[in-house]
Image (spheres, grey):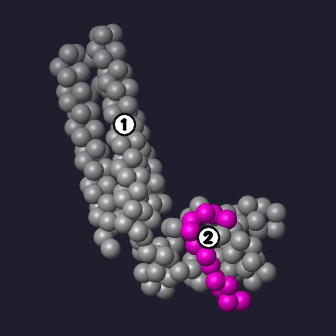
Amino acid sequence: MNEELELIFEEAKDHMKKSYDFFVHELVGIRAGKASPSMLEGVEVDYYGTMTPLNQVANINVRDAQTMTVQVWDRNMLQSVEKAIRNANLGFNPVNNGELLIINVPPLTEERRKQLAKKAREEAEKARINIRNIRKDAKKHIERLEKDKAISEDMSKNALDDLQELTDRYIKKIDEKLAQKEKDILTV
């Protein structure tokens, strides 16, 4: 394989992996009904004048499927953390017992489950579009190499076939991850 062709293919592969990883990260943020520390991932606390992610000032643990605890390392921060969780607009109402925060995760309604499943499908579609755009860009580069006579027509065809195979593989991974997440969301 031509060196430029290899570079194009590796770059496309790297971009597709990053796009897939971002999609997986976005799915983690979508609640599936069971208590999970990732539910509090976006919460930031005013830690002595600096906005700091919650997981850098406290331990977040899951007691059971409906209960989480937040053990703040600096007890003086307990009320600030409680306020930050309330203000994060996650629908949580932490109970402060003086030592830690107890968060009861309310069960999802059927309507909310459908909304979350729809959001997961939207994220999957964004990821698929990203993957296809990466393929489109790589395809343009390959066709330009062929036009400039840097590679043969056969090399170009093989490279385009490999690129399509890579694209199909990532689209399939996205679809599998989406199906798994939808199952988690819709399971009561």
Amino acid marked by disc 2: Asn
Residue 11 horizontal side relative to residue 139, left or right: right
Residue 76, by quadrant, is: bottom right
Q: Quadrant of residue 183?
A: bottom left
Mark 2 sits on what residue?
A: 55
Q: Residue at x 59, y 83 (%)?
A: 102
Q: Is residue 88 above or below residue 148?
A: below
- In the rendered image, which quarter contains the N terminus? top left
**91 in magenta:** yes
Return the residue at label 1.
129
| Mark 1 crowdedness (10 Å alpha carbons): few <14, some 14-19, many ≥20 | some
Position of residue 71 relative to residue 150, above or below, is below
Q: Nearer the viewer, residue 119 or 154?
A: 119
Image x and y of residue 36, in percent = 47, 73
CA gap between label 1 and label 2 equals 32 Å
Q: Position of residue 152 (x, y in %)?
A: 22, 16
Q: Earlier in the sequence, mark 1 or mark 2?
A: 2
| Residue 161 quadrant | top left
Question: Quick check: can you spot residue 80?
Answer: yes
